[in-house]
């Protein structure tokens, strides 16, 4: 892959070649700044375990490969937030591999015109057959990609049609506001089907084995090296056809499991970027002059305390409300999140004024009210309940749980904290839904309140870990899910749904989490709903 | 010679049930892990269908006995399965990671020997003196330190505060590219191609974790050296040698130490296998891409194949190591047999 | 007839005491170890009544305070008093290690005695079982057991006990094996004692001295093991104070300058393990004077 001659200077880049090799051994640490203007070294705590998002077992951090190495038909726009940082813009859909698109007259088809100049990394043209093959793959392989496609009403290969080499048509099952945005999430990436099919076998018609290790995309970067558990190196695609060629030539994603090591590396200037920093480090490093910390609240996400309605005391709405009044919100927010994110408590009215989501729940810390509600519900003497947290998220869940536990004790509820190992967490909390009281973190990729309610409040749906069921929610959610936002009915219905969610509190909002990214002399970091690093816009200051 | 051969065969046959036991236990242990890998690996927004699909894809829908047979068959064929969390074949993962762990462990042991053996000899020549007590306290203090704690403190002091240690980012700093794989040991590979710059960088990365581990292994080595030297020094041949007027250093090194070496080497073998297991924590602290950190990650996500592969590999390594120690023993000292075992 | 209460059948009471006194005088380190052990015992027994603050009560306003006159070891991220937590944790940590070692001692003794006394196929099977356990990387085996059974104090004790059983069993087996045909054993048998009785009251006590040494060394190791499990995240459940967990969590705060979170529990951990190791050494001197010259 990398030949001897270029090996030494591979990462040093142009800037560092000025330093003679003989000097290097005497430098204790080569500062990242000396690694050249066009190389960015980034650290993350998680392993990238596959280069193919569609594969079974591909983990979340690997989604960034789909973003950086592959193109989609469309993408979201970019906007500048109040604090001056960049964010993707949910309201704007922009062309990526597609040049333009239109909706058919009956509204039941989307027709995309591909860029005639579009090229894959191997130089072959991006044609409609590739798009169809990729979409067929996404809806056929099962697991996460298929579920995500389904959210946009993209369910079967019959929907995808090749009109000609550069025209691709999607036949819609229903008119839905979710379809177009769902084409801009990482899942419907466009794969070079000619290359993939060369490596497909009878047992493996979708070339899962091949694409797992060898991407075949058209994106802004190519993968220059990948060592799972150690690092991934992106190399710029000099001939990117779906957007402006990135300014940075190489991006090194280095995996460092220990968060304090990551912090030390950034603090000492050994790396340019630290992705998804712990809140505490973000808070403290933001006071450093030469480090920029960008903290962006995650859209459509709330960290919640969930009482499970399958268990006796929580069947009573008043008990759930009592708990909502007992949580020491401010302490939890300051101790667990170090104030990074947005408060989700202390709303002034029990009826929502608008359809913003998430918005502040009308609860605050009031132990008297909590006690009174418990008395009323007949649990004046309290009860015992396990409070479950995820071992792999214990950095914030543990302090939050401890503070909640303390306040619950004050109203007579004895909570014992139970740490559940990562592998079991999803099974216990989401699939079997058997945790009486637990913390939960759902955030929806598609930024609509109805989408959140669909996953988290409708009975039987994955993130409704409270086993909540409310007849009105059951009818309102499917009604609003595909409805255009500008439909006058939409706001009315959503407000009603929020009102119910507040009153019945099957999910007690704690705060809206944030993604922290620390950078040193790096511009152009952009927040995305998928919470992965988009390397395409990065620049060195 | 035929006697030795018989001993070897007997010893080898004793290892077979152990390996079988390890295969069974590792299978049972992983299946007893609470998680459901199908759920974990089905991804963020997976519903029941996709979980079921994942389960079938992973072969977890089959009955336990069948799963075991499949597993045992694969192991016999040398196939350890595919790790779900790294997405690579387990065998390949282990092959790339084992050298990292071995390199670290061996460096630590060499370091440890360089300090522990002189300390032990010193203590043995002056038993009961202040030096003896000091040695004892020092090495005991070393073994009393939790390795993960020592590691963190060393990083803080030498990297963060003083800036003399390189950044704790694994086997090589960002700016270097790993040497072409020959043995997988960076120090050896770099030396073989004469790339001394990379060699130096790899060595620097090794220093802190190696110190952390060697602090932990000083005690058994120093203590065994001391004890073996004491018993050697009190033996008749030393008295004879002294009476014959040999110089003290000659007595000490040529006679006493050579005789004390055997128990020390045995201890070294035990310490080696123990340290390889204890690597788990140190690797986590130093982002060392060894098999220890691999096992921890795999265990947390119930990555069956990876856990089984790791345990099996380690067990085989241990068995092989013990075998070698035992056999060297028999070859050196024919009085030792296995009849009593 | 010897009974279980005498530490070593070869020494009579007075002689034993005199020997202990002699060893302590000649070896100041052992004396120190006994004093340190006393401190640990006091912490474990009376710690909860001595501490200045409630170790479990948080105070977000006082979070991450450096050591001061009010909080001698500072406060943690929830504003809890580190000193109080360190002192109170002594009881749990000692309890875990004592329980684990007692368990492996008991099971190891029984299995080892059986294997050593009767021998035959039982011996072979047990030996292979111990081989199998020892063929595992022990810490990883403990991790696996705790992960499989769930992370509670009991399971940490079981896991630590399991990985220690072979050491005791091997030791007892060797001692019993040597002595099962010794004169005193034969004599006791001829006097009409059953096999079980001979084994339990005549042969087994001979294995006690080396086992006491093993116990003491193992106690320290058991504490480290539990702490290591906590570091991986498989420790006792919060908010219980435990040294390993405190070090593990505190380690994340060292780089940001809050060193007291990890250093103090780390030092306590080291203190305890250190004590047990020195004690083990000292005990070896007392029970087996031949080891010293």
Image: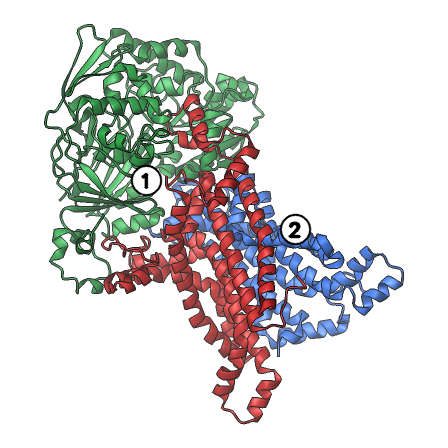
Chain colours: A green, B red, C blue
**Quarter of the rendering containing residue B27:** top right
Q: Looking at this view, name the residue that lies furthest to the front.
A: B2
Tag 1's secondary structure?
A: loop
**Residue C203: x percent and y percent?**
77, 63
Instruction: Name the spot of residue C76 as percent of width and height, x first.
Output: 42, 46
SS of the residue under disc 2: helix
Q: Chain of mark 1?
A: A
Front of the two marks 2 and 1:
1
Q: Position of residue C16 (x, y in %)?
A: 73, 72
Would you say residue C139 is visible in this rendering?
yes
Return the residue nearer the eye: B9 or B50.
Answer: B9
Q: Position of residue C156 (x, y in %)?
A: 56, 46
Identify residue for label 1: A48
Crowd band around label 1 with a 10 angstrom C-alpha radius: few (<14), some (14–19), many (20+):
many
Residue at horizontal 85 percent and vertical 66 percent from the top: C187
Chain assignment, label 2: C
Q: State whether residue C32 is above or below residue A44.
A: below
Q: Are marks 2 and 1 on the same chain?
A: no
Q: Which mark is residue B72?
A: none
In the rendered view, tell whether residue B336 sits above or below residue B307. below
The residue to which callout 2 is attached is C103
Q: Is residue A165 above or below residue C192?
A: above
- Label 2: how many residues lie within 10 Å, few (<14), some (14-19) or many (20+)? some
Looking at the image, is B148 positioned above or below residue B56?
below
* Contact between labelled residues 1 and 2, with CB atoms less than 8 Å apart: no
- The residue located at (27%, 51%) in the rendering is A265
């Amino acid at each position: 892959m990398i030949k001897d001659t270029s090996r030494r200077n591979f990462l040093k880049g142009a800037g560092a070649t000025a330093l003679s090799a003989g000097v290097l051994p005497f430098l204790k640490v080569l500062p990242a700044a000396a690694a050249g203007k066009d190389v960015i070294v980034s650290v993350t705590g998680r392993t990238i375990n596959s280069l193919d998002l569609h594969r079974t077992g591909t983990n979340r951090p690997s989604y960034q490969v789909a973003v950086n190495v592959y193109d989609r038909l469309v993408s979201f726009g970019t906007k500048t937030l109040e604090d001056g940082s960049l964010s993707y813009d949910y309201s704007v859909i922009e062309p990526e591999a597609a040049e333009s698109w239109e909706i058919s007259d009956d509204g039941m088809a989307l027709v995309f015109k591909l860029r005639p100049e579009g090229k894959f990394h191997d130089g072959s043209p991006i044609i409609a057959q590739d798009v169809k093959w990729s979409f067929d793959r996404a809806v056929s392989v099962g697991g996460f990609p298929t579920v995500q496609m389904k959210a946009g009403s993209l369910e079967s290969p019959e929907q995808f049609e090749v009109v000609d080499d550069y025209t691709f048509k999607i036949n819609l099952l229903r008119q839905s506001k979710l379809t177009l945005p769902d084409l801009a999430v990482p899942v419907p990436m466009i794969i070079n089907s000619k290359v993939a099919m060369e490596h497909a076998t009878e047992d493996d018609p979708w070339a899962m084995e091949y694409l797992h290790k060898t991407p075949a995309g058209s994106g802004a970067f190519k993968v220059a090296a990948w060592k799972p558990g150690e690092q991934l190196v992106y190399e710029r695609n000099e001939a990117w056809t779906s957007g402006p060629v990135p300014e940075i030539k190489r991006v090194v994603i280095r995996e460092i499991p220990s968060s304090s090591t990551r912090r030390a590396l950034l603090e000492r200037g050994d790396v340019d970027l630290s992705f998804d920093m712990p809140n505490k480090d973000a808070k403290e490093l933001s006071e450093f002059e030469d480090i920029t910390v960008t903290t962006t609240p995650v859209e459509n996400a709330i960290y919640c305390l969930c009482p499970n309605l399958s268990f006796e005391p929580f069947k009573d709405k008043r008990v759930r409300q009592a708990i909502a009044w007992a949580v020491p919100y401010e302490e939890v927010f300051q101790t667990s999140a170090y104030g990074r994110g947005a408060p989700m408590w202390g709303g002034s009215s029990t009826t929502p004024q608008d359809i913003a989501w998430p918005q502040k729940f009308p609860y605050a810390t009031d132990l008297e009210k909590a006690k009174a509600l418990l008395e009323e519900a007949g649990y004046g003497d309290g009860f015992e309940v396990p409070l479950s947290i995820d071992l792999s998220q214990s950095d914030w869940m543990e302090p939050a749980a401890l503070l909640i536990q303390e306040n619950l004790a004050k109203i007579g509820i004895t909570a014992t904290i139970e740490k559940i190992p990562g592998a079991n967490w999803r099974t216990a909390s989401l699939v079997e839904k058997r945790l009486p009281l637990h913390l939960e973190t759902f955030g929806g990729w598609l930024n609509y309140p109805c989408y959140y309610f669909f996953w988290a409040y409708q009975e039987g749906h994955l993130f409704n870990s409270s086993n909540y069921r409310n007849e009105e929610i059951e009818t309102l959610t499917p009604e609003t899910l595909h409805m255009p936002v500008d439909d006058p009915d939409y706001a009315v219905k959503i407000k009603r749904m929020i009102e119910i969610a507040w009153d019945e509190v099957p999910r007690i909002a704690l705060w809206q989490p944030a993604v922290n990214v620390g950078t040193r002399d790096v511009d152009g970091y952009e927040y995305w709903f998928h919470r992965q690093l988009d390397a395409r816009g990065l620049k060195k200051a | 010679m035929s006697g030795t051969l018989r001993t070897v065969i007997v010893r080898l046959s004793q290892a077979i049930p152990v390996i079988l036991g390890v295969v069974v236990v590792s299978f049972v242990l992983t299946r007893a892990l609470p998680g459901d890998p199908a759920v974990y690996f089905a991804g963020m927004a997976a519903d029941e269908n996709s979980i079921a699909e994942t389960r079938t894809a992973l072969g977890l829908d089959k009955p336990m006995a069948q799963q075991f047979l499949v597993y045992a068959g694969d192991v016999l064929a040398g196939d350890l399965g595919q790790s779900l969390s790294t997405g690579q074949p387990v065998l390949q993962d282990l092959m790339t990671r084992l050298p990292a762990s071995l390199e670290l462990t061996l460096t630590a042991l060499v370091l440890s020997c360089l300090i522990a053996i002189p300390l032990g000899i010193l203590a043995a020549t002056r038993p009961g003196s202040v030096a003896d007590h000091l040695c004892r306290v020092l090495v005991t203090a070393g073994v009393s330190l939790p390795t993960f704690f020592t590691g963190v403190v060393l990083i803080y002091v030498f990297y963060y505060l003083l800036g003399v240690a390189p950044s704790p980012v694994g086997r090589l700093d960002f700016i270097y590219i790993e040497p072409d794989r020959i043995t997988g040991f960076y120090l050896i590979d770099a030396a073989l191609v004469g790339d001394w710059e990379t060699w130096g960088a790899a060595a620097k990365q090794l220093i802190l974790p190696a110190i952390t581990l060697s602090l932990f292994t000083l005690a058994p080595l120093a203590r065994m050296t001391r004890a073996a030297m004491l018993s050697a020094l009190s033996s008749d041949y030393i008295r004879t040698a002294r009476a014959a007027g040999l110089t003290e250093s000659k007595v000490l090194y040529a006679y006493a130490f050579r005789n004390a070496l055997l128990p020390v080497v045995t201890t070294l073998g035990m310490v080696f296998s123990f340290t390889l297991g204890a690597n788990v924590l140190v690797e986590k602290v130093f982002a060392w891409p060894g098999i220890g950190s691999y096992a921890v990650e795999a265990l947390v996500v119930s990555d069956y194949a990876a856990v089984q592969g790791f345990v099996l590999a380690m067990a085989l390594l241990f068995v092989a190591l013990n075998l070698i120690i035992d056999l060297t023993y028999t070859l050196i000292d024919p009085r030792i047999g296995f009849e009593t075992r | 007839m010897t009974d279980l209460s005498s530490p070593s059948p070869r020494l009579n009471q007075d002689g034993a005491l005199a020997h202990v006194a002699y060893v302590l005088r000649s070896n100041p380190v052992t004396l120190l170890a006994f004093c340190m052990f006393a401190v640990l015992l006091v912490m474990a027994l009376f710690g909860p009544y001595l501490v200045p603050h409630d170790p479990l009560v948080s105070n977000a306003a006082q979070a991450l305070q450096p050591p001061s006159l009010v909080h001698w070891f500072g406060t943690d991220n929830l504003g809890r008093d580190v000193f109080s937590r360190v002192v109170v944790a002594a009881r749990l940590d000692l309890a875990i290690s004592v329980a684990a070692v007692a368990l492996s001692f008991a099971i190891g003794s029984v299995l080892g005695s059986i294997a050593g006394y009767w021998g035959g196929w039982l011996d072979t099977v047990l030996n292979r079982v111990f081989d199998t356990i020892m063929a595992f990387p022990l810490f990883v085996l403990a991790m696996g057991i705790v992960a499989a059974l769930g992370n509670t104090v009991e399971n940490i004790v079981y896991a630590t006990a399991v990985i220690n059983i072979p050491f005791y069993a091997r030791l007892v087996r060797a001692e019993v094996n040597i002595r099962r045909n010794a004169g005193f054993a034969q004599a006791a048998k001829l006097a009409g004692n059953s096999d079980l009785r001979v084994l339990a009251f005549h042969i087994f006590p001979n294995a006690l001295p080396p086992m006491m040494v093993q116990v003491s060394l193992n106690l320290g190791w058991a504490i480290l093991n539990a702490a290591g499990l906590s570091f991986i995240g498989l420790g006792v459940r919060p908010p219980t104070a435990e040294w390993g967990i405190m070090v593990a969590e505190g380690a994340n705060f060292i780089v940001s300058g809050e060193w007291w979170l990890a250093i103090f529990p780390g030092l306590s951990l080291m203190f305890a393990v250190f004590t047990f190791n020195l004690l083990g050494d000292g005990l070896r001197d007392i029970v087996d004077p031949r080891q010293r010259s």
